[in-house]
Image: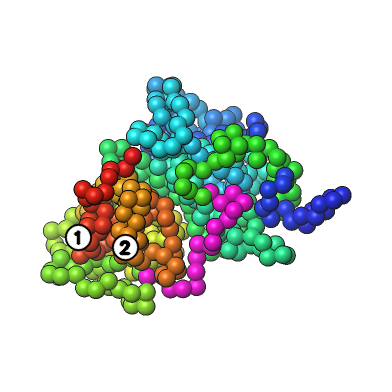
Amino acid sequence: MVTGASITMDPFEMEEYATFTDAILVQYVSDPARLRWAGGGGGGGFFVEADAAPSGEFAPAILVTRDGREVAGFAARRIRVYPVAIRSRWEQGEPEARRVVGAYRPGARSHTQMLAILPGGTWVLITARGLASKALARAFREHARFVAARFRSAAGRPYAPFAAILELAAGRPARAGSSVITPLERVITDRPEPAPVELGRAIRRRWPEVQAWRAEWGGGEEPGEEAGNGKVPAPEESAEPVPELPAEIPASSPEPPARPGPAEAPQDAGSAPGDAPGAGLEAEAGLAFLLGQAWPLARPRLTRAFPELAAAATASEAAAMLAQARPGASFWSRTGQAIELYLAWTERIPALRRAAPARYRALKEHLKIGAAWGQDADEPGELAAMAALAWLFRPGERRALERLLGPDPDLPDPE
């Protein structure tokens, strides 16, 4: 507890009492072709232009800018931080002529920045755009719910997100539409590492600056998305059983069996027929990308269907373990198409929610997402990812999913 002349407060309890120029800028590079690692290897990651590594996770690397310049600095595939605040906005135009737009419009990309502190006490500003922007915002929200569910003040109020460490990771590069990207992932742990009390006090001393930093972008989050800044949503986990991720139906099944309920055992995915191509690096990366878009939702279902994945902390680890355990499963040949559906459905779901609410509710019920199943979500990307995963693992569900999410003359295209 911190005691002042007139204020007694717990440093991790978020309240609205209480701009950063000293924070190190950490850029998330999603394009694997733009980051050259000193030790070899490929893929994107976290890059900082500096004379010295900001923490032990960083090693020498070269960032190749869009105009071909090479910038020396340091890069990391994982970063551990205490997240303080987040802000997002929509931007449109080429890098040299970007302009801020008030809401999504065709061609706009989201831009998210997270203010955080490294374990050594250094302030950092993690910045990401496009799909990585959405992943960064989602990781912050998930972490905020995670912390609120496990850390409380003496009065029973949930702590702020910076009360425990957040670990972010660069996944395996995957093709998303016409681009190759390195997905940004949140590392899930069952044993959160609490922050030192002194760190909480240091953040409190600069809280007016934090608020001003967020206000620079108008308060902060993408439209329709909560970021958990002081208004922490309900905990993400529940004691209720969560239904498993549907396992694949053998190709010989003429009709799909009934979908398993929460208490039913998962079906065995088995192996594909002899002509199945099996798991490859591109298919594995594609599955990791899809899992990463809804990892807290997908993880418990995936481990119920495939118990051998229980030790996976990230979507990339889960995909790699599944590729090793089930290399002959035929779903590997469909990951590219599932990603295309995810991208299309992410654009379709906001219009579905607005213009066809009954079908939107039917979609969530079909995916077993809601209070009745112990998990809930309304973010288009999460719902689209879960739908694409259901399409991927259970071919018998495709017709129902396409009826709910496919083209419809009564459903206008997304604005």
Of callouts 2 and 1, the N-terminal one: 2
- Binning the other alpha carbons within 10 Å of mark 2 as few (below 14), some (14 to 19) or many (20 upward) gives few
Q: Quadrant of residue 330?
A: bottom left
Which residue type does callout 1 highlight? Arg
Residue 398 is situated, as x and y percent measured from the top left of the image, at: 21, 60
- Residue where numbered disc 2 is placed: 362
Percent coordinates x, y for residue 91 in the rendering: 44, 32
Quarter of the picture containing the C terminus is: top left
Residue pictured at 54% horizontal, 61% vertical: 234
Point 51% across, 50% down: residue: 226
Task: Determine if residue 59 is in view.
Answer: no
Judged by depth in the image, the label closer to the viewer, 2 or 1, is 2
The residue carrying mark 1 is: 399
* Relative depth, front residue between 238 and 220: 220
What x and y, as percent, mark residue 143?
A: 54, 55
Per the rendered image, the range of residues in magenta is 227-243
